[in-house]
Amino acid sequence: MINVDVTKLSSKGQIVIPQSMRKEFSIGDKFVIIKSNHQFILKPVSKLGRNFVENMDFAKRTLKALDKYEKGRFREMKDKEFLAELEKW
């Protein structure tokens, strides 16, 4: 499920994660944050475990795909073809 909300940057450089999106986190939890241009990916360190490299690779591929999309370099495909491509990820 995707949640969307609005937050703001404080004068101290802090960004508040809306309460509805942080219910499963505790005070002191650590996060990895990845920035690409004006986009951020936030992932709890506790969820990284053995799949950290896979997660980083997925994040890079996702950002690359988004960049292609934003530049109009994408192609339309049928749902089954899309799912087959997704399985390769």
Image (cartoon, helix red, strand yellow):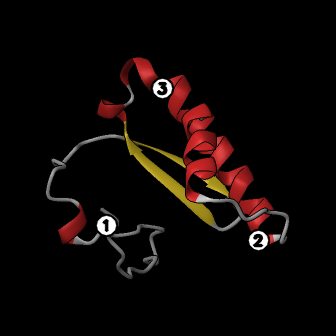
Q: Residue drawn 36% across and 34% down?
A: 45
Q: Give whichever of discs 2 and 1 has the lower sequence position.
A: 1
Comparing 10 with 71, the one in front is 71
Q: Is residue 73 left or right of residue 9?
A: right
Residue at mark 1 to residue at mark 3: CA–CA distance: 22 Å
> Which numbered mark, 3 or 2, is in the foreground of this view?
2
Q: Secondary structure at mark 2?
A: helix
Using the image, determine if residue 42 lies above or below residue 7.
above
Q: Identity of the amino acid at label 3? A: Phe
Q: Residue drawn 40% across and 69% down?
A: 15
> Which numbered mark, 2 or 1, is in the foreground of this view?
2
Q: Give whichever of discs 3 and 2 has the lower sequence position.
A: 3
Q: Which residue is mark 1?
A: 17
Q: Position of residue 50 (x, y in %)?
A: 41, 17
Q: Residue drawn 67% across and 43% down?
A: 61
Q: Which mark is residue 82?
A: none
The answer to whether mark 2 and mark 1 are in CB contact below 8 A is no
Residue at mark 3 to residue at mark 2: CA–CA distance: 27 Å
Q: Is residue 57 left or right of residue 17?
A: right
Q: Which residue is mark 2?
A: 70
Q: Which residue is mark 3?
A: 52
Comparing 80 with 37, the one in front is 80
Q: Residue drawn 44% across and 23% down?
A: 51
